[in-house]
Amino acid sequence: GDVAVLVPAAGAGVRLGPGRPKALRLLAGEPLLVHAVRRIAFVPSVRTVVVAAPADEVDAVRELLAPVAPVQVVPGGAERQASVAAALAAVPAGPEIVLVHDAARALTPPMLIDSVAAAVRAGAAAVVPVLPIADTVKEVTGDDVVLRTVDRSRLRAVQTPQGFRRSVLAAAHAAAADPLTDDAGLVEQLGEPVTCVPGSEHAFKITRPFDLSLAEHLLAEARR
Ligand code: CTP
Ligand code: MG
């Protein structure tokens, strides 16, 4: 295995509504994080998994994941970017490919994780899985008046796992100023190329209650 996977899982899940931190919310009776880590561990080239957990849930997450896969658990930070940085700092020497994968993308197919790692192995500095945008996209003013319609043919929705040459991700985080919502954005700021590979609809991020219901339905269908 030449791959380390960092799993930011320290968010509160405000948009999902009141309850436990999102990574610990149940989907088909198991925490989202368990679904995500099980799929990561299924990828043969993965040697190391580091989870950034909510600071007061580190021991609970360690116990939760012990029967699922060998993982390291570290306390996350106030922003996603700080959680990723904390996980990156815990990666031992060895893996030269580092993937960053949201716990909230609990149903991501192992094949997608493998394809992102393969693109880095083939020489890309940074790799993001993307999908075309289905809806028409408009730019609006601060008070919601339409300014213009954006040409969506050149727009992509970006998922995780995002994959990096280890040195590139380390340099990107070392140079990071303002927190961004993804790691490839930090690499863009370094001026390094970011390569797209086809994403997967199953890698959708569980953000709002609708997404959790969708995930429940997809799992129930797969088990029928
Ligand atoms: N994340 C993290 N540390 C943070 C914030 C987010 O590790 N301080 C993780 C989340 O646990 C999630 C991923 O980053 O797996 C994507 O973030 P998001 O979907 O925004 O999750 P939350 O921040 O938990 O949700 P919300 O923004 O609705 O509170
Ligand atoms: Mg968030």
Image: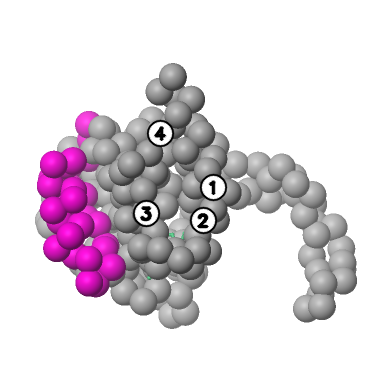
- The type of residue carrying mark 3 is Arg
Quadrant that contains the N terminus: top left
Give the residue pinned by disc 4.
Answer: 109
Contact (Cβ within 8 Å) of mark 1 with mark 2: yes
Question: Can you tell which mark lies on residue 25?
Answer: 3
Q: Which residues are magenta?
A: 44-73
Determine the CA span between mark 1 and mark 2.
Answer: 6 Å
The quadrant holding residue 149 is bottom right
SS at mark 2 in the image: loop
**Relative image position of residue 136 (x, y in whole percent):** 79, 49
Q: In front: 36, or 86?
A: 36
- The type of residue carrying mark 2 is Thr
Contact (Cβ within 8 Å) of mark 1 with mark 3: no
Give the residue pinned by disc 2.
Answer: 207
Which comes sooner in the sequence, label 2 or label 4?
Answer: 4
Give the residue pinned by disc 1.
Answer: 211
Which comes sooner in the sequence, label 3 or label 4?
Answer: 3
Which comes sooner in the sequence, label 2 or label 3?
Answer: 3
